[in-house]
Amino acid sequence: MKPSNTIALAMLGLYFAVGISDANEQRESSVKHVAGAFDVKIKVLQPDNEPARAANVGRMSLEKQYKGDLAASSTGEMLYSGDGSTSGSYVAIERVSGSLHGRKGSFMLVHHSLMNRGTPENWIITVVPDSGTDELQGLKGSFKIIIDKGQHFYEFDYTLAE
């Protein structure tokens, strides 16, 4: 089996694993909430393989600057289907680096959303488990993006181990 297939199968197995907990997990503080604005630059990239081109899957790079209690920058990549004005979907992953309520470090966000006739549905953005570094180790949370009149805003509910 090719290494890439092995990794894909392992990730799939991790996705379906349920009820696994770490008995030594640190006590978490209460849920905190931050909100603010962010700027985003999106660059359309060419699909890098024939199956992606044949499936009409698009790629974009992301660069963001978060403002407020999340003072950070991020880079990432998005895969999408559809043109964004009708129906389609996207998945993305981004690394956020900076400070969250004054605590410095980085973490990964994973995105998933469906577009139904121009309206986002099932838009889920979460912190990738164990992706927090430095003072953000143990970070867990869910992220929400609001787009109003072309401006981007975020709301982030999170917990951090004490």
Image: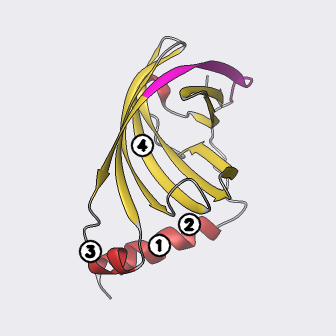
Tag 2 residue: 14
Using the numbered discs, state the Cα–Cα distance from disc 2 to disc 4 in whole angstroms: 20 Å
The label shown at residue 94 is 4
At a point 55% along the width and 13% down the height, the residue shown is 69
Q: Which residues are magenta?
A: 28-39
- The residue type indicated by label 3 comes to Asn
Tag 3 residue: 49
- The residue type indicated by label 4 comes to Glu
Using the numbered discs, state the Cα–Cα distance from disc 3 to disc 2 in whole angstroms: 26 Å
Seen in the image, is 34 located left or right of residue 102?
right
The label shown at residue 113 is none
Seen in the image, is 50 located left or right of residue 5?
left
Q: Say what secondary structure mark 4 lies in.
A: strand
The x, y position of residue 43, in whole percent, is 31, 45
Q: Residues within 10 Å of mark 3 (few under 14, many from 20)?
A: few
At a point 48% along the width and 16% down the height, the residue shown is 67
At a point 70% along the width and 64% down the height, the residue shown is 18
Tag 1 residue: 10
Q: Is residue 149 above or below residue 5?
A: above
Which dot, 2 or 4, sits closer to the camera? 4
Q: Is residue 32 magenta?
A: yes
The x, y position of residue 139, in whole percent, is 56, 33
